Image (tube, helix red, strand yellow):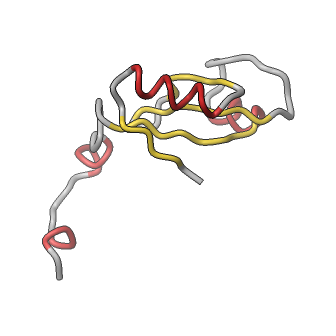
Amino acid sequence: MTDMQNANVSPEQFAHLGEGAIGYIRKISSDDFMAAWPGVAEMPSGIDIWALFAADGAPILLTDERSTAIAAASEKELTAVSLQ
């Protein structure tokens, strides 16, 4: 076993891994976004958007361009990581 397999990390600690250092970029449908985060943003139904999320999963930015999400991560001094 590796040290990582033996690490004791609480769910609370895990939720904060990468906080302030990593930004997750993901393409998501507007319908899925509004269902997951009701009231955060109103947008047309049935469109694809790019979202930048904080390490804890909180949305930071919504855009129609991947490059804008990457630029926003850089501007906030976050390492951009793409999620599939």
Quadrant in the picture for the C terminus: bottom right
Give the residue drawn at x 23%, y 45%: 13
Asked if 40 appears above or below 14 in the picture, the reply is: above
Residue 52 appears left or right of 41: left
Asked if 25 appears above or below 10 in the picture, the reply is: above
* Picture coordinates of residue 22, whole percent (x, y): 35, 38
Asked if 3 appears above or below 34 in the picture, the reply is: below
Residue 81 appears left or right of 61: left
* Picture coordinates of residue 31, whole percent (x, y): 77, 35
Q: How many marks?
A: 0
Residue 9 appears left or right of 49: left
* Picture coordinates of residue 64, whole percent (x, y): 71, 27
Give the residue drawn at x 16%, y 61%: 8
Give the residue drawn at x 54%, y 50%: 83
Residue 20 appears left or right of 58: left
State the image quarter where residue 19 is shown: top left
* Picture coordinates of residue 50, whole percent (x, y): 65, 33
State the image quarter where residue 74 is shown: top left
Quadrant in the picture for the N terminus: bottom left
State the image quarter where residue 79 is shown: top left
